[in-house]
Image (spheres, helix red, strand yellow):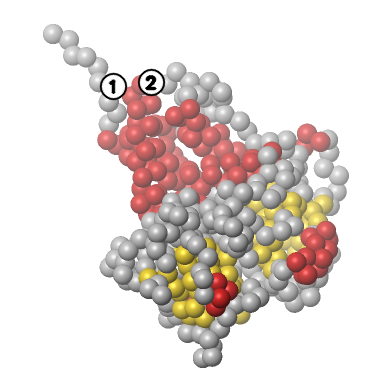
Amino acid sequence: MTTEPTTEPTTELTELAADAYIYGYPLVHELTMVESFTRTGMGNLTATPFNQFGHVHQPADPAAKFVSLNNDTLYSIAQLDLSGGPLLLHVPDYRGAYFVLQFVDAWTNNFAYVGHRATGTEQSTWLIAPPGWAGTAPEDVRIIDAPTSVVTVVGRSACTGPRDMPRVTALQRALTIASPQPRGPASAVRSGLPQPDPAVPEPLRFFELLRIWMADFPPAAPDLAYQDRFQPLGLLEEGPSPYVGADPVLVRALEAGLADGRARVEAASGPPPPAQLPAGGWDMDLHLFDYNVDHLGPGTLDEARWQITDRHTARLTRAVAARTALWGSHAYEAVYAHTFTDADGKQLTGAKSYTLRFDARPPADAFWSVTMYDSPDHYLVANPLGRYSVGDRIPGLRYAADGSLTLVLQRDRPTDPDEAANWLPTPAGDFRPMVRLYTPREEVLDGTYRLPPIEVHHG
């Protein structure tokens, strides 16, 4: 009697594939966005080649399908290719106005900041150096060491409205990237990222992208040993793709592991358990971007309270951050607080009307806002008013005599004039608002400040 060979993967192999998904999702998602930015553009940003800034000349709107997109500032985004050598970044004088340039590596690590909080608003020049570079910067030029040869620079410039646009536009024109020396032939600059073998089946495409991009953009040294665990999955193989004509057992393990890993990221991306967050509480997630402990450059705070030292926790946190708030910043730059539920602990939905009452203005040294996103995609919400956020810079908000501010969150325009002035439109279905506090004060950062819950509006 012969025994038929099994085609079911072992539990260990499937769990390994799930771990690989959680580990690699930030890299794949980040570089997918880099590729989209340079090839097709993103929302209000047209396609922009490597080593050039693309600028938004009007606030973001729902056409930009990007998770938790910032509607408070105007973006200036550049994808840097350092494979041909370092680049010079020139920053004009912002004359005290809020701005930040956030540097993100291929693994979504925020590794440097230039701007209002971090380095001041005066004119400056920076040399962005590739991994392993041992050269010397020009005089009076500071160095930012990049962990990977592709870097995303996310610039945000505060804009108070249409009358402020000429000022911001002039600053955008003066924000430049150049090479300190000739970089050789055009081929020295990427025309695109490494591409997967088209013969790889679509269900395995994620792992193929992870395989080729891991090889091109190595992680921090402590993660290299962790990557070695993925040898049985084919992720460390060089040359032709191991996923073309792969063993059925491996295919099943990868497919099951991808589904399990994705489910784990989604579960971790939802609201905290009730024991951790009271009904209607806002999840400030002050440490959502603290997973980077290996590359802390200018503008970052190399302090224990801003570092997740347990790498297992850090990997899942990094995946959640990439899933829900890609290119978000450390809490000491800006705090992003969100909630899914009202004061009774029920899911927020456009079928109801709500109020959000601030007894006093939230504690932020720069400014604050509340932005509306749908759920579960976390996209901006289209509405006839064209209002996607409200905050202290929105003209016409109506404050009470005691200085309090009550916002109205509902689908249809309120009939009461005061409520209409303070209206933040919601979608028809579920939603998740987000409060942003720019340059938050210490009572926010130490966790003593609490945002008020959203109440069902019975008016």
Residue 435 appears anywhere in the view = no
Question: In the rendering, at what x and y percent does residue 310 appear?
Answer: 40, 59
Residue at which label 2 appears: 247
Question: In the rendering, at what x and y percent does residue 271 appear?
Answer: 37, 60
37 horizontally vs 231: left or right: right
Kind of residue indicated by mark 2: Asp
Q: Residues within 10 Å of mark 2 (few under 14, many from 20)?
A: few
Q: SS class of the residue under badge 2? A: loop
Q: Residues within 10 Å of mark 1 (few under 14, many from 20)?
A: few
440 or 22: nearer the viewer: 440
Residue at which label 1 appears: 7
Q: Residue at x 44, y 73 (%)?
A: 355
Q: Residue at x 66, y 75 (%)?
A: 395
Q: Quadrant of residue 74?
A: bottom right
Please tell me which of labels 2 and 1 falls first in the chain. Answer: 1
Q: Residue at x 56, y 76 (%)?
A: 417
